[in-house]
């Protein structure tokens, strides 16, 4: 016997058809590691075929005494004829696996532990999607299990400790024992954070599902119980006033507090049981409630069901309290203080804010009507978005107007940026709650974001258009000060740019020009004796200092400039505002901060709280290189009410060339459009949320008992207008998988799902188009009674045994 086609091929994916050539007749059988998948009889020598399925691993085809072997290798994939959702899947996969920290490790107590991200929180959220792409999941959880503090607290993150001993972190976090050092690594807990323990339990539960390893799960249960008990006994975590988990006033689940709530030496991350003004953030509590139920379930599997009852009782009691305190009808209130009523605070009406954890809560153990109301709140918001918004998936909306310092720039990071974290969670919830059309709409708009920005996901996107105030600009006339030619030509006493001939800025536009919305007067060298720019350099023929006379109060200075780096510091020089009272304010000009190397085209990084201070003004070819670049940069100063006598530009003492092509004064502080990308969290966290929606929402594959031993399959492709699709969802950790082929025959009014997998059975729910109802169900060609289940339209539900492949066919009318 041999495999037809490529004789050397011995690896197949589930649902591929395998064709065998045999020179003999006889009965044949194909077996997977967990049993037969197909059998038949070849009456005469020739060919027979079957569809690959069953457990992953080495399969055998036998005919008499002859045996042929091949390997079944499942891999998570999405195939649809148009490629739309295949491409979305690839964007999520690329972002999840492309993170710098994926595969990083620490060595602790003689053992190496790998993780996706070195923060437990981030690791667990990434795990939601990465478990379908990578194995070796256990060490990322075991690291925090094995290092658990004696009272049950779970560490937040682990970083290498430098050779010199104590750092600023020790000074900040020693009170409360929130930092420890061992084996060259420092374990830290951000004191204000109240979510880490429930995330640890969630991580254990997700890893157990992917691995199917009950023994491993059992080894984590005591640590899980200690972690959850810590939360309700620690004065740092438990609100005796409300009987719920508490935290300082942060933006949702993030780790920095509002400035005037920082009562522990002004530190935005520290809390103290007797000093901090605590409140209730709903997401800490919905996460904790769900973790209690997850732990109870795991205790039951481990034969400790009686111990689980106290956690389910606790979850039920906390859910009732949370509903009474925080439920606002369509969402949970962001933060309910212990010491005051909600009101207008920090530039916003607190009771109106829709925060990130509402999206998580819609997929947690809350009432279904609450989950539906949350989804509908986001859906309504999608119809009334602010100008420039890429979507309704806000970290918080409306954003704060003040109070969070550098983290409070409007529409950036946690203060009003848009994130696929929320988009993915809301899409998944929409599919679960019968709002498939909205779930598909969210996925399509997320896909459009990924396509627009390099075929991958960012963690945060700028949440709205930040409009600058009306500004008066005054371009400065630099003709009398200019000392270099932007062309390589030069003249007597006038260097030609950097002295490299045609490697120059001869193609840069001249005259009255606007770059990044700022007007400049750019000198034409042919009209000014070849003097067209200020060239600062500690080198013969150049100058090291220029004074720009001002003589009045100004808001800021903008420079049109670039540099050539011949030093290690990246410093081009300094800009100094000199005031009439004799005081000064200086700022370094540093590559990547407010200037760019002219031969290294770069764009400014995403805004992370603080505003953007520079942008690319122009880039283009010169005779020597295809892409040279000039930046526009803004320089604020702290005393805008003072008269500025002059602004002094001074060259770096260590060898950099600094070329200034234009200078403009402004009556306002610096403003640059922040661009479409914000930042603040790992990109793979965001992508994992989208993967979660793709797998459990659109593909409709849920793991009921772990390792896909019992799967629930509810394809939602009809809601995306797709009549055909093929999906495989795979756990590399255990090789557990589910694969199916979806086919909708609109003419025949039939929906077929051909299914295989590593488990023994599945619940297949087949939705039919809205307005129709299922009238018949066949399983492998035989009539089968089915359950009529609710959904957008009607659904036919049927339990099937999986032996090889099974086909469920539902006819509707």
Image (cartoon, rainbow, N blue to C red):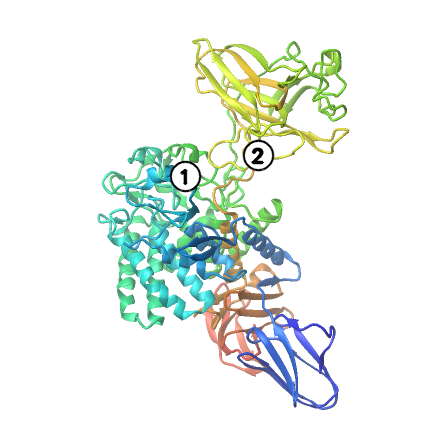
Height in image: 263 above or below 755? above
User: Which mark lies nearer to you, 1 or 2?
Assistant: 1
Q: Measured from the top left, where is residue 369 in percent x and y?
A: 38, 58
Q: Measured from the top left, where is residue 604 in percent x and y?
A: 57, 34
- Residue assigned mark 1: 164
Q: CA distance from mark 1 to mark 2?
A: 33 Å
10 Å crowding of disc 2: few (<14), some (14-19), many (20+): some
Number of the label disc, if any, that sits on residue 522 = none
Q: Measured from the top left, where is residue 594 in percent x and y?
A: 56, 28
734 or 238, which lies in front?
Answer: 734
x 57%, y 12%: residue? 548
Residue 481 left/right relative to 788: right
Quadrant of the drawing holding the C terminus: bottom right
Q: Measured from the top left, where is residue 196 in percent x and y?
A: 36, 52
- Residue assigned mark 2: 604
694 or 759, which lies in front?
Answer: 759
10 Å crowding of disc 1: few (<14), some (14-19), many (20+): few
Report helix, strand or loop for mark 1. loop
Q: Earlier in the sequence, mark 1 or mark 2?
A: 1
Where residue 533 sits, quadrant-wise, is top right
């Amino acid at each position: 016997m041999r495999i037809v086609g490529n004789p050397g091929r011995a690896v197949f994916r589930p649902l591929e058809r395998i064709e065998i050539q045999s020179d003999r007749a006889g009965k044949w059988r194909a077996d997977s590691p967990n049993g037969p998948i197909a059998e038949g009889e070849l009456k005469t020598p020739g060919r027979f075929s079957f569809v690959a399925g069953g457990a992953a691993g080495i399969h055998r085809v036998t005919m008499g005494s002859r045996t042929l072997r091949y390997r079944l290798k499942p891999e998570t994939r999405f195939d649809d004829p148009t490629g739309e959702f295949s491409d979305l899947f690839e964007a999520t996969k690329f972002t999840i696996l492309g993170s710098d920290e994926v595969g990083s490790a620490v060595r602790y107590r003689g053992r190496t532990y790998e993780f996706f991200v070195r923060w437990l929180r981030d690791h667990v959220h990434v795990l939601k999607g990465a478990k379908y792409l990578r194995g070796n999941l256990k060490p990322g959880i075991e690291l925090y299990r094995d290092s658990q503090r004696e009272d049950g607290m779970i560490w937040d993150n682990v970083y290498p400790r430098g050779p010199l001993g104590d750092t600023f972190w020790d000074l900040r976090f020693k009170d409360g024992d929130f930092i420890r050092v061992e084996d060259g690594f420092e374990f830290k807990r951000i004191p204000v954070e109240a979510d880490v323990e429930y995330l640890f339990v969630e991580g254990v539960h997700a890893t157990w599902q992917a691995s199917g390893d009950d023994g491993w799960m059992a080894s984590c249960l005591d640590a899980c119980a200690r972690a959850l008990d810590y939360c309700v006994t620690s004065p740092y975590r438990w609100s005796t006033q409300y009987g719920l988990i508490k935290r300082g006033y942060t933006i949702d689940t993030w780790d920095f507090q509002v400035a005037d709530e920082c009562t522990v030496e002004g530190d935005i991350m520290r809390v103290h049981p007797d000093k901090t003004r605590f409140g209730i953030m709903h997401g800490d509590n919905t996460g904790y409630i769900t973790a209690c139920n997850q732990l109870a379930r795991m205790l039951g599997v481990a034969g400790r069901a009686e111990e689980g009852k106290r956690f389910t009782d606790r979850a039920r009691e906390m859910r009732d309290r949370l509903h009474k305190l925080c439920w606002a009808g369509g969402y949970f209130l962001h933060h309910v203080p212990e010491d005051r009523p909600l009101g207008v605070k920090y530039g916003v009406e607190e009771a109106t804010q829709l925060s990130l954890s509402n999206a998580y809560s819609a997929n947690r153990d809350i009432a279904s009507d609450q989950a539906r109301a949350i989804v509908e709140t986001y859906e309504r918001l999608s119809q009334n978005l602010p100008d420039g918004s890429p979507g309704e998936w806000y970290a918080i909306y409306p954003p704060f107007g003040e109070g969070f310092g550098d983290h409070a720039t409007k529409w950036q990071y946690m203060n009003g940026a848009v994130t696929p974290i929320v988009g993915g969670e809301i899409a998944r919830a929409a599919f679960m709650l019968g709002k498939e059309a909205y779930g598909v709409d969210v996925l399509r708009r997320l896909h459009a974001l990924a396509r627009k920005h390099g075929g991958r996901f960012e963690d945060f996107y700028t949440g709205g258009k930040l409009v600058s105030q009306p500004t008066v600009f005054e371009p400065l006339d630099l003709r009398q000060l200019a000392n270099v030619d932007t062309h390589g030509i030069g003249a007597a006493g006038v260097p030609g740019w950097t002295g490299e001939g045609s490697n120059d800025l001869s193609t840069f536009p001249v005259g009255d020009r606007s770059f990044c919305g700022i007007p400049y007067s750019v000198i034409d060298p042919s009209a000014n004796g070849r003097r067209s720019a200020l060239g600062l350099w500690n080198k013969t023929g150049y100058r090291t200092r220029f004074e720009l006379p001002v003589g009045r109060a100004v808001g800021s200075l903008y420079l049109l400039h670039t540099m050539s780096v011949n030093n290690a510091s990246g410093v081009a020089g300094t800009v100094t505002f000199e005031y009439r009272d004799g005081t000064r304010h200086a700022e370094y000009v540093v590559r990547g901060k407010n200037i760019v190397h002219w031969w290294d085209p770069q764009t400014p990084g995403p805004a992370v709280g603080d505003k953007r201070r520079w942008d690319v003004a122009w880039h283009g070819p010169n005779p020597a290189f295809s892409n040279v670049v000039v930046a526009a940069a803004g320089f604020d100063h702290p005393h805008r009410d003072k008269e500025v006598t002059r602004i002094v530009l001074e060259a770096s003492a260590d060898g950099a060339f600094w070329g200034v092509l234009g200078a403009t004064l402004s009556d306002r502080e610096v403003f640059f459009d922040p661009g479409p990308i914000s930042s603040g969290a790992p990109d793979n966290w965001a992508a994992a949320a989208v993967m979660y929606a793709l797998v459990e929402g659109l593909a409709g594959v849920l793991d009921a008992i772990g390792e896909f031993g019992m799967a629930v399959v509810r394809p939602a492709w009809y809601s995306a207008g797709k009549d055909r699709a093929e999906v495989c969802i795979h756990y590399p950790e255990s090789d557990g998988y589910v694969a199916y082929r979806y086919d909708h025959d609109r003419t025949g009014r039939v929906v077929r799902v051909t299914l295989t997998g590593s488990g023994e059975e599945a619940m297949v729910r087949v939705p039919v188009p809205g307005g129709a109802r299922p009238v018949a169900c066949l399983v492998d060609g035989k009539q089968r009674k089915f359950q009529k289940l609710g959904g957008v339209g009607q659904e036919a539900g049927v339990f099937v045994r999986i032996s090889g492949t099974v086909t469920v066919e539902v006819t509707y009318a």
